[in-house]
Amino acid sequence: MGASVAYHLARRGVTDVVLLERGKMLATGSTGRNAGGVRHQFSNEANIRLSIESIELLEHFVDEVGHPIDFHQDGYLFLLSTPASVETFRHNVALQRGLGVDVQWLEPRQAAALAPGLNVTGVLAATFCRRDGIADPNGVTMGFARTAQSLGVVVERDVEVTAIKTVSGRVSAVETTRGTIDTRIVVNAAGPYARLVGTMASADVPVDPIRRHIFIAAPGSGQATLDVPSSHIMVIDFDTTFYFHREGAGLLFGMGDRQETPTFDTTVQWDFLPQVIDVAITRLPALADASISHAWAGLYEMSPDGNPILGSADGIDGLYLINGFSGHGFQHSPAAGRILADLITGRDPRFDLTPFAAGRFGRHGAAAGERYVV
């Protein structure tokens, strides 16, 4: 998010920008720990519109940004196993198609044909969008950052923000472990740490860190290969949130833990793996004989309704928020960065930000959130 905003500001001629990264390298936090998925298939119209713009930029990244990225558009396949899910997806497929997204409605046998090795027992229907896919989070981040730097943006690594100073309700400076930066504009792009950074300016940013695991499976003893799709198709069992896609010679898979509570701990909880495996071998029997080569955990930055918080902070002039993307931040960073850069430079963002407004959570009749949080 920070790299995207910096890039889009620089493209608009605003180059007196400093991008602060707490880590020793960019894209080593939540960005570097995600599965890289990008999709049009959301339940909220605003998120679908973010996807349309973001995926279009990813498709032309080398031409627009100037750096090549690894991007496989082999599609997202959602498996639906309850009547309620089928009804929900029928409504949302109509919404997606109405916005120009080509989403197919499939019978179980058609879904199985798209993903060899998949067991569709109990599946009632499926949806598939071929322009969805898997992109490289590090490549996208570094592409944005390098082009921004070439235009004059300064990227400081291994530096931490310790305070945000305000005067009469207006941002005036940022204090860091390397000194003070005088500025009238601050963008909070701190991911799962957004709430902590917000409190530095007395702003309430309702974002909580939720741990999510990713496991990599490799052929087991005596196996030459895994009986899994040869493409990079992303398969999601919607009702359990189990998902998988090919990763090199192995398979990347994961599943949400409904018992997880907010934490900054990214230690792998191996006692969660059996719960995932129980679901995994039902949908992909080849995993029963596979071995787990490695695993990691990252943090979702969850908002109360699964929608992002995008725009200016209430009550603090000069503070902008690009937070709470609830597991969809990487894929929506191209559009979100462009929108925020337009707001900062006084341009019309050409986007209805009402569903993403910072103060929406206390309002009666706030827009519905996102139901497709995986």
Image (spheres, rainbow, N blue to C red):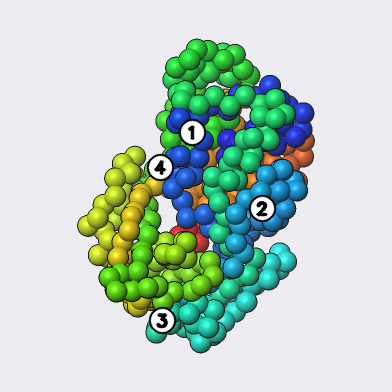
Nearer to us: label 2 or label 4: 2
Question: Circle 3 sits in a helix, a strand or a loop, which is it?
Answer: loop
Tell me the CA gap for discs 3 and 2: 32 Å
Q: Please report whichever mark, 4 or 1, sits nearer to the chain's N-terminal start.
A: 1
Nearer to us: label 3 or label 1: 1
Q: Residue at x 71, y 64 (%)?
A: 99
Q: Position of residue 82 (x, y in %)?
A: 43, 78
The amino acid on which the numbered mark 4 sits, given as a three-letter code, is Asp
Q: Please report whichever mark, 3 or 1, sits nearer to the chain's N-terminal start.
A: 1
Which residue is disc 4 drawn over?
Answer: 208
Placement of 170 over or under 333, stated as above or below: above
Tell me the CA gap for discs 2 and 4: 28 Å
Can you say which quadrant of the picture contains the C terminus?
A: bottom left
Residue neighbourhood size for the residue with mark 2, other residues' Cα within 10 Å, grouped as few (<14), some (14–19), many (≥20): many
Q: Residue at x 66, y 49 (%)?
A: 68
Can you say which quadrant of the picture contains the N terminus?
A: top right
Can residue 8 be seen in this snapshot? yes
Q: Please report whichever mark, 3 or 4, sits nearer to the chain's N-terminal start.
A: 3
Question: Circle 2 sits in a helix, a strand or a loop, which is it?
Answer: helix
Residue 119 is marked as 3
Between 232 and 193, the one nearer to me in the picture: 232
Residue neighbourhood size for the residue with mark 1, other residues' Cα within 10 Å, grouped as few (<14), some (14–19), many (≥20): few
Which residue is disc 1 drawn over?
Answer: 25
Question: Circle 4 sits in a helix, a strand or a loop, which is it?
Answer: strand
Asked if the residue at tag 4 contacts the one at tag 2, i.e. Cβ–Cβ closer than 8 Å, the answer is no
